[in-house]
Image (cartoon, coloured by chain):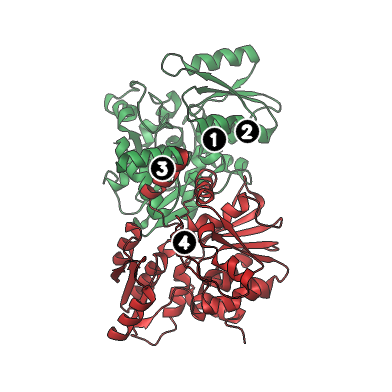
Chain colours: A green, B red
Amino acid sequence: MPVIELADVALALERIRGVAHRTPVVTSRTLGENVFLKAECFQRTGSFKFRGAYNKLASLPAGRDVIAYSSGNHAQAVALAAGLRGIRATIVMPEDAPAAKLEATRGYGAEVVTYDRWTESREEIGARLAAERDLKLVKPYDDPLIMAGQGTVALELLAAVQELDALVVPVSGGGLIAGCATVVKAMLPGARVIGVEPAAGDDHARSRAAGDRVRVEIPRTIADGLGAPEPGELTWQVNRELVDDFVSVSDDELVEAMAFLFDRVKIVVEPSGAAGVAALLHGRVPGRRVAVVLSGGNVGAARFAELVGQAAA
Amino acid sequence: MPVIELADVALALERIRGVAHRTPVVTSRTLGENVFLKAECFQRTGSFKFRGAYNKLASLPAGRDVIAYSSGNHAQAVALAAGLRGIRATIVMPEDAPAAKLEATRGYGAEVVTYDRWTESREEIGARLAAERDLKLVKPYDDPLIMAGQGTVALELLAAVQELDALVVPVSGGGLIAGCATVVKAMLPGARVIGVEPAAGDDHARSRAAGDRVRVEIPRTIADGLGAPEPGELTWQVNRELVDDFVSVSDDELVEAMAFLFDRVKIVVEPSGAAGVAALLHGRVPGRRVAVVLSGGNVGAARFAELVGQAAA
């Protein structure tokens, strides 16, 4: 029995209707009329994560409070979704997460607990607090309801764009691509699904090569949204079957793609969110008619200036 | 007899239909549900200027080649419009215009002639080349067809947003606001039209105070799109009657507004294009329900990094 099916994603789309944004599909004359960018930078809380978080929280018994651990975007997503559902959220975040993400999470009304991501385990902290405070743990990706929520990105995309040779999706724990691949393989089985990882954290490519989940060092990359060191257990069950290929991009290529999207498309995309365009610009995506998920836009102006300034210098 | 009327703008909208983009009206939860941003950064060539240029060129006799002088956005607009109309364009640009704008203009197939904007007159160079080469001069703002084309911004806006207390528009030579004010005062006479100038180039505010057109020093401002030192002759005939107020913003306020739009709305706006939001954020715009024209997005990633980096330092 599959971990999730198309029907789960369709149900998720019903749950988030009128709450999440139906984000635009953007084209650019520079990339050509056959490249479609699904702009989740315009999603509420600035990334696709809101879709899965809201789908999960809307499926919980009324009044059940939640806890989550996250490098940032999942944190904001759970915090906002909890506020909208009228429940309380506790969020475990790395102490070196971007200040803007820490502030935004607190701004949505969540309680933030920080930890050192080089020495402590967020899973352990999350599990301990969940037990102590009787909170429901909302995992960032390894949950069928989270995956189904993220898959609504692809469902909206395929409603807007007919015929595709490939869909390109950034990969961290694998929740977004698991949901999207479930949709694409059910609706457009001829289209390829390509995952993009940071070169410093290519655990999916290594897992594919090894035939089983491989854990790498915690990736040191500017793509702070792509920091998971190994595929999720459930997401991998989906992705090992449905994802056609995993490719990787360097930090320099991510900055170049962010600047490209800034200059040519006039939109703000965070390093993780630019991974698909980076792969596309460097010829790592097959096919003529291609859609790319721009997964998020949570990079502050000052951080963007720093990244692009270093690249220009 | 008025310089332009609503009918001229309606006709311009017909001419640009299917050629110019109908740009989105964007809202931001931070600014609130009563603030509407007309995002001309997503217009072809990256600014509203394409509307006026195409309206003008589509009204010329077939095969008439053109010349234009411009600090950048009008140049790209005329260059692309000429290419689409199958005619040749010669563009006179300041030699210190942003490199991206010089390159983009050449990229659209135009011939670029540069000049020193501190010692030479672009009007004189333009007039001389027009005579020598038998070219039709396409002025950046002081032309009823240009003004009518720019007014389509407001016509599209009022089709999307009902009821407004005020429309806020960046002002350089006054073409955009003349077209927009013509539309607003005809369709929503109770709404105020507010022009925003850089503090270093507040020639419209001074002209209003003096009761006649006042010329200031060439403005030294980061808003390279707002460099006209005096109101246009024809635009002033419109604006002295129809614009309710002119307010000004500092360069620091422009950078702050650019960073705000980057962080909160995830869109790229050049310094000139951020003028309206800068005025709004600093309480210089009256009214509860307000629309703001984001006039353009032609600031390179490296230049943005420089401006925001200096502000952060």
Per the model, the C-alpha gap separating discs 4 and 1 is 50 Å
Q: Position of residue A164 (x, y in %)?
A: 38, 52
* Quadrant housing residue B284: bottom right
Per the model, the C-alpha gap separating discs 3 and 4 is 58 Å
Determine crowd level at label 2: few under 14, some 14-19, many 20+ residues with C-alpha closer than 10 A.
many
Determine crowd level at label 1: few under 14, some 14-19, many 20+ residues with C-alpha closer than 10 A.
many
Q: Which chain carries label 2?
A: A
Q: Name the residue under label 3.
A: A185
Q: Earlier in the sequence, mark 1 or mark 2?
A: 1
Per the model, the C-alpha gap separating discs 3 and 2 is 36 Å
Q: Which chain carries label 3?
A: A
Report whether mark 3 lies on the same chain as mark 2.
Answer: yes
- B204 in relation to A146, above or below: below
Q: Mark 4 lies on which chain?
A: B
Q: Mark 2 points at which residue?
A: A108
Q: Where is residue B303 in the image (x, y as percent from the top left)?
A: 38, 49
